[in-house]
Image (spheres, rainbow, N blue to C red):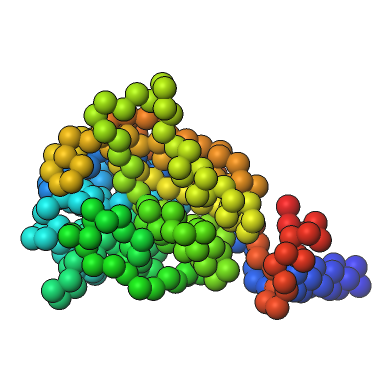
Amino acid sequence: MLRFNVILLVLIMGISIHSLYGQTPPKKFKLALVQMNVVGGDSKANLTHAREMIDKAAANKANVILLPEAMDLGWTDPSALTDAQPIPDGQTSQLLMGLAKKHSVYICSGLIEQDGEKVYNSAILIDPEGEIILTHRKINELDIGHPYYDLGDKLNVCHTEYGTFGLLICADANAQDHVLTRSLAYMGADVILSPSSWAVPPDHDNAKDPYGSLWEEAYIPVAKDFAVWIASTSNVGKMTAGPWKNWNGIGCSMVVNPKGQVVMKGPYGAAADTILYVDITPVPRPAQGTKWHEYWNSGKKQ
């Protein structure tokens, strides 16, 4: 009888949890932010380095690995017009898919995508089986990127044991009124991953003008309003071609928690090639039909 009561209690608790959150609460996970040197136009060097960094992150028990925007060719490098490759059959996709399966991890990376006559600044999320489960094409591209990339026209999310993931790329987060980031949150994202490429002029003085406020202003309000995690990884290294030639990619990768707090900020500088780790505890979403602000104000969201 005691055993029956215990089983009944467990079932009731399970039903209550599912009713409250609308789904099984997502698992905690370890996120690795690969703040890597990216050499413009040199996909061979970049993919070799990405492999090294992914191997290291996986050895350090990361569950999800996030790499920068345009990891294979570099942002606005002219090689985008000649060397972009398709998804999923291109060299970049195939390498990342193989590494995700090898290490049984999720991998998210920016890459330059060729689709017929068009070229996109894209990002993919790959599951531990080596399958691409989410693809995003950058929507809010800077004007200087328009000669290189066509613009995306869709947002989407995908569901995993670590919660629901959404993808943005860099300046997508700075769309007017943060509309793209907020849209992903309304679509149910628990975690928003954003491959980025943050750069400054060669004479930038970080002591006088610390880098990062632009992204704090973009991420913090949305993270706090919707209780979502937002994580962005930027590359490092000198840009050797394109409109920002001689500018420096400077890292400063960032993670903002569901309370709107910056819980991690990577080192600054063209030589700040490193991997950063953050433990992520996604906040479960309310049951379908629950008004978000009512759920938040009820105190159930912690």
Could you tell me if residue 239 is visible in this image?
A: yes
- Residue drawn at x 30%, y 39% is 199
- Residue drawn at x 47%, y 70% is 158
- Residue drawn at x 77%, y 66% is 294
Of the pair 66 and 40, the residue shown nearer to us = 40
Q: Residue furthest right?
A: 1
In-image side of 249 versus 60 (left or right): left
Q: Residue 182, relative to residue 63: is it above or below?
A: below
Q: Residue furthest left?
A: 82
Total numbered badges shown on the rendered structure: 0
Task: Check the picture and name the quadrant holding the N terminus.
Answer: bottom right
Q: Residue 232, relative to residue 16: is it above or below?
A: above
Q: Residue 197, relative to residue 93: is it above or below?
A: above
- Residue drawn at x 38%, y 45% is 233
In-image side of 2 versus 294 (left or right): right
Q: Residue 178, relative to residue 247: is it above or below?
A: below
Image position, residue 145 (x, y; %): 23, 56
Could you tell me if residue 21 is visible in this image?
A: no
In-image side of 258 versus 215 (left or right): right
Of the pair 282 and 195, the residue shown nearer to us = 195
Image position, residue 69 (x, y; %): 30, 51
Image position, residue 80 (x, y; %): 15, 57
Image position, residue 180 (x, y; %): 47, 64
Q: Residue furthest top?
A: 207
